[in-house]
């Protein structure tokens, strides 16, 4: 099972757990609808596109509305901490949430009781909490953007708002050094996928791959295109790819889908997500050795 965790900017969405499916521009789980066009919804939509392509079980989601008061975040952490052992996900991806370090610490302590440790991915608030609590190495993949890798590189910062001034400029030339510093300071997961004009894949302070093509500058202002990479890498790990390969193919898929969508300032992230199946059908057999009709051993690497 793949379990995707994150808040939605809504005061009306109660905490919801269930298997997800798409319904037009919305996602549906346990009778609750929420948008697939931003944030957590974009991440879930991307992962769902991968499971659909590989004919795998659709993701389960744990979502809640949270408009900044932290109630949704606390409700999700409470539920997951109480049920993680029985849910036993193969892949656990944690996304938008308030970075409440004490709750993350309690969850990771509970995860030690799982018969099989989940493969753990974090982005956004969950990643901030992990770094701030000194728990980053417990995660398998982080997916930071350029400002977030600057945060991971700063040994003093407990939140991106508190990055040292000299790191705040997000100079692209500094990213390789910031990657090295994040690993040196034990503020990185086992593998980093740094999203940006150039995508970097790194482990143990070493850059394994960079992805720059296709270069689609009009993707940059479209909200959610970083969230989709997190969903893509989650789905590809769940499908059985090695984490390094999953990260590379997630970046390539996002870029190629952006190219196919012919984005304009009016393009929404759902228009990019809708191209993922096309990219997969055209490229995944040659990239991964796994074709649409090939049985997938999803437990190879999770």
Image: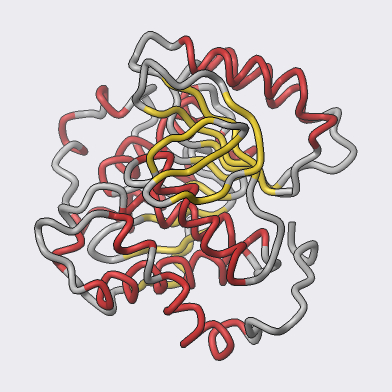
Q: Relative to 190, does residue 126 appear above or below in the rendering?
A: above
The front one of 156 and 18 is 18
Tell me how many marks there are: 0
- Which quadrant of the figure has residue 51? bottom right
The front one of 187 and 234 is 234
Tell me residue 50's x, y (percent). 56, 64
The front one of 121 and 55 is 55
Q: Residue furthest bottom?
A: 286
The reply, left or right, for residue 9 in relation to residue 185 is: left
The reply, left or right, for residue 203 in relation to residue 257 is: right
Kindly identify the residue that appears in the image at 48 percent across and 72 percent down: 249
The reply, left or right, for residue 131 in relation to residue 159 is: right
The front one of 192 and 218 is 218
Tell me residue 67's x, y (percent). 34, 17
Kindly identify the residue that appears in the image at 58 percent across and 37 percent down: 29
Tell me residue 41's x, y (percent). 42, 42
Q: Relative to 87, does residue 27 appear above or below in the rendering?
A: below
Kindly identify the residue that appears in the image at 61 percent across and 19 percent down: 77
- Which quadrant of the figure has residue 254? bottom left
């Amino acid at each position: 099972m793949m379990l995707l965790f994150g808040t939605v900017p809504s005061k009306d969405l109660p905490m919801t757990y269930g298997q997800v499916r798409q319904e037009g521009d919305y996602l549906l789980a346990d009778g609750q609808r929420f948008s697939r066009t931003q944030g957590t919804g974009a991440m879930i939509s991307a992962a769902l596109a991968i499971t659909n392509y590989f004919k795998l079980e659709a993701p389960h989601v744990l979502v809640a509305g949270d408009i900044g008061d932290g109630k949704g975040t606390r409700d999700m952490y409470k539920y997951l901490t109480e049920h993680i052992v029985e849910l036993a996900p193969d892949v656990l991806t944690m996304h938008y949430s308030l970075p409440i370090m004490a709750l993350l610490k309690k969850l990771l302590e509970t995860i030690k009781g799982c018969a099989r440790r989940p493969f753990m991915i974090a982005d956004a608030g969950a990643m901030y909490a992990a770094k701030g609590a000194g728990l980053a190495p417990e995660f398998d993949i982080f997916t930071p953007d350029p400002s977030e890798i600057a945060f991971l590189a700063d040994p003093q910062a407990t939140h991106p708002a508190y990055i040292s001034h000299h790191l705040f400029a997000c100079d692209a030339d500094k990213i390789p050094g910031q990657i090295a510093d994040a690993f040196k300071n034990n503020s990185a997961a086992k593998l980093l996928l740094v999203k940006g004009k150039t995508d970097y894949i790194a482990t143990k302070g070493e850059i394994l791959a960079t992805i720059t093509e296709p270069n689609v500058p009009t993707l940059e202002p479209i909200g959610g295109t970083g969230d989709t990479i997190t969903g893509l890498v989650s789905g590809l790990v769940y499908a059985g790819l090695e984490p390094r390969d999953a990260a590379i193919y997630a970046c390539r898929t996002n870029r190629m889908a952006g190219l196919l969508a012919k984005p304009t300032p009016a393009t929404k992230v759902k228009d990019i997500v809708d191209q993922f199946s096309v990219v997969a059908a055209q490229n995944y057999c040659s990239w991964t050795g796994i074709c649409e009709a090939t049985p997938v051993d999803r437990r190879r690497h999770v």
